[in-house]
Image (cartoon, rainbow, N blue to C red):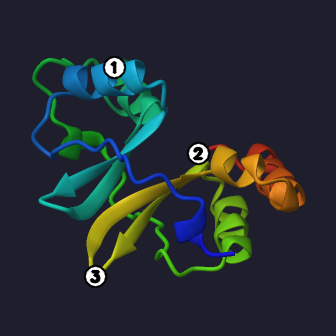
Amino acid sequence: MKVRDLMSQNVKWVKPNQSLEEVAQILASSDIGSVPVCQGQQVIGMITDRDILIRAIAQGKDPKTTKANEVMTQEVRSVSPDTDIHQASDLMAENQIRRLPVVENNQLVGYLAIGDIAVQSIHVNEAGEALSGISEGVQH
């Protein structure tokens, strides 16, 4: 099974110049903890609720004026739609991440969450192993 078989194509993303307040509102309204930061359709970073808290709020930065690109993680792990689902699961576990952008021809085309893998009963073990690897890993 390939990533394209399980990925979500309805992907929320933010622009690098959006305020952290706007990013937080998108995260809250979508009930997600991370979102890609895109310039056009190209992923240039990821921002999480934790990034906002640790890299901005805890540092006294104003969420109304601080921009996504100021606190985002620039090193983004991603997969292609043709990546084997087992490889994607391993990548999630190894890098302690719960959501992967799906990129094709340098453009964001989808998102794969650990929950997408868990929904497929044939991949319950892989999802469990990935989640276990994520949960047991070193905290950043």
Q: Residue at coordinates 22% horizontally, 42% vertically from top-left?
A: 14
Whole-percent x, y for residue 66 in the image: 15, 29
Residue 110, quarter of the rendered image: bottom left
Residue 65 is tagged as none
| Amino acid under disc 3 | Asn
Q: Is 89 above or below relative to 73? A: below
**In front: 118, or 130?**
118
Residue 57 is tagged as 1
Element on which disc 2 rests: loop
Q: Is 108 above or below relative to 67? A: below
N-term-proximal mark, 3 vs 1: 1
Residue under label 3: 105
N-term-proximal mark, 2 vs 1: 1
* Quarter of the figure with the N terminus: bottom right
Locate residue 85 relative to residue 10 in the image: left or right.
right
Alpha carbon distance from label 2 to label 1: 17 Å
**In front: 126, or 94?**
126
Whole-percent x, y for residue 42 in the image: 21, 66
Residue 22, quarter of the rendered image: top left
